[in-house]
Amino acid sequence: MGRDRPHEHGFHLMWHTIYNEWGHAIPDNTAFFNELRRDHRITTKVEFLNTDFKEVEGGTIFSSDKTNEVTNFVSDGNIDVDIDRGIRRTAELTLLNPTTEFTPHTDGFQSEGPWVGKVYLNRMVRIWRGIYVGKQSLYVPVGTFFVDGATVMVEQNMSLVNLTLSDRWKAIAKSYSGHDFTWPKNTHYNDIITDILNFGRIELNGRYGAVLDWMGSRDSDDRRTGAKTVIKQGVSRGDRLKELVRKWNLDAYFDPMGVFRTEDRTTERDRSTVWHFYSGPAQNDINGMLVSLQRSFNDDNLYNHVVVIGTGSDKKGVTYTATRVDDNPRSKYNRDLMGDRVKLFESEDIATQNQANRALNRLWNMRVQLSETIEANVIANPALEGDDVVLFTERDHVLVDDRYRLQRFNVPLVTSRQTMQASNIITGEDI
C-alpha cells in the first residue's frame, strides 16, 4: 500500500503509489504523473469505511465523470492542507442525495437511537482524487477523515448532503487529559508520542500502524527530554502533542491513508525535490502547470544576538546560560548597523551547560536568515503532501528558480485549480 513510500534522508516524498478504480495498486505510476502535465479529465472517489478501514456495503461512490451503479455522486468538494495545524487535512464534501442514502439518521428516527446508514457523525471517510489515463481512471488518496458535521438540504424534491470532515488527528485533539500526566526526564520522544497515540486509540501496529522516525542522525540528548514533561488536567492531548513535536523539530501528521507518521526535520534542507512547477507555453503537449505566482520576503528570522537559557536542572534555582553577539565591524549584521536583534531561547529540555552550548551553536548558525514566501496558483497535483519540497521556476518577471517547502495548499475534487503557499528560509548572503 501507499505507506511504503520511498524516503530520502529519513523524509517522506509525495505520494507515489497509484491505484485503479478497484483500489489495486498499479506497478508503474509514470503514466499518471505524465498525464498531470497534459490536458486531462479528473475524477473523484469517496469510500465510507467501518472501524477496520474496510468499505461498508455499497459505500463507494464516484464523481459524475465516472459511470457507476449508484446514482448518487460527488457534486462538489475541497480538501485543505496546513502543516501548522494538528489536524493537517480538513475537507468539505457535497453529495447528490436523491435516494436519501446519505441522509444521517438513527434507528426508528429516535433522537437517542443508534446511528444507521452510510453517513453519521464520526463515520470514517476516505477520499481519492484521480484522472483519466486513456479510458482508465487512476487515483491517489487525498485524505482519510472523520465526519464532523452533516447538513441535509432539499428543494423541489432535489436533495444534497454537505459534509465537513477532519483527519484522524481529531481522535487525539478531542482526547482531554483527566489528570496531570507526567513523563520523567530522559524519556525518549517516541515513548511520549506512543503513549499519547494510545490514549486516542491510534493503531501502533499492522497495516495502518504508526510510522515513527527514530531520529538516528541525532545525538542521543536530542532524542530525549531534558526535564519532566507534563500534560495538565483538562488539556487536549492532541494540542499538547503538536506543541511538543514542534519543540522537538519533528513533523507529525496523519497521511492520506490515515497512517500516523513522524519525520525528523533537523536536516530539512537536504530533502529531495518532488515536483517542478514552471511557467511558459506547453511543449509537445507538456505544460509546467504554473498559472500565477507571487513572491515576498521579510526579515523576521534575522538576528545578531543569541541568548540560551536552560531551566531543566534538577537543582532548584539552577539555570544554564549561553550567549553570543555579532559585534564584528565587518559584518553586515552587526549591532551597530542593525541594532540589537535578540533571539531568546528558553527551554526546560536544556539541563546541562553542554546542552546550552549546543543549542547556542545551532541558533547562531541560523542567525542570518530571511523568510521568503511563494503563493501560487497551479494545475492540481493531488499527490503532494504538506512539507514536501517543490521547485518553482519563473525567470521572466518574478525571477525565481528555487526549492520551497509546502506549508498549505488545497486539493479540489471537481475542478483543476490548486492554490498553495510555500516558504524557503534562505541565508542573507543568498540574495
Image (tube, rainbow, N blue to C red):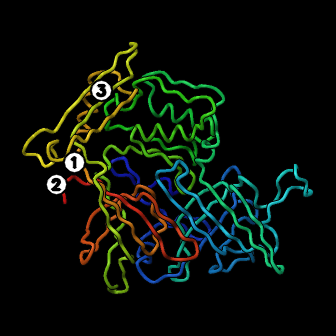
Q: Which residue is drawn at 31% across and 31% down?
A: 219
Q: Mark 3 or mark 2: which comes first in sequence?
A: 3
**How far apart are labels 1 and 2 at the CA level?**
8 Å
Mark 2 nearby-residue class (10 Å; few <14, some 14–19, many ≥20): few
Q: Give the secondary structure at mark 2.
A: helix
The kind of residue tagged 1 is Val
Residue 99 falls in image quadrant: bottom right
Query: Vertically, is 107 above or below 29?
Result: above
Residue under label 3, please give it.
Answer: 355
Rendering coords of residue 166 (x, y %): 61, 55
Of badges 3 and 2, nearer the viewer stands 2
Q: Between residues 180 and 60, which one lies in front from this camera angle?
A: 180
Of badges 3 and 1, nearer the viewer stands 1
The kind of residue tagged 2 is Glu
Q: Are marks 1 and 2 in contact (CB under 8 Å)?
A: yes
Residue 162 falls in image quadrant: bottom right
Residue under label 1, please give it.
Answer: 368
Query: Vertically, is 180 above or below 394?
Result: above
Residue 96 badge:
none
The kind of residue tagged 3 is Gln
Residue 429 badge:
2
Q: Mark 3 or mark 1: which comes first in sequence?
A: 3
**How far apart are labels 3 and 2 at the CA level?**
29 Å
Rendering coords of residue 9 (x, y %): 33, 48
Q: Which residue is drawn at 78% across and 74% down?
A: 159
Mark 3 nearby-residue class (10 Å; few <14, some 14–19, many ≥20): many
Query: Vertically, is 101 above or below 368?
Result: below
Rendering coords of residue 204 (x, y %): 57, 40
Q: Mark 1 or mark 2: which comes first in sequence?
A: 1
Mark 1 nearby-residue class (10 Å; few <14, some 14–19, many ≥20): some
Q: Which residue is drawn at 63% across and 39% down?
A: 200
Q: Single out the residue that lies furthest toward the left.
A: 330
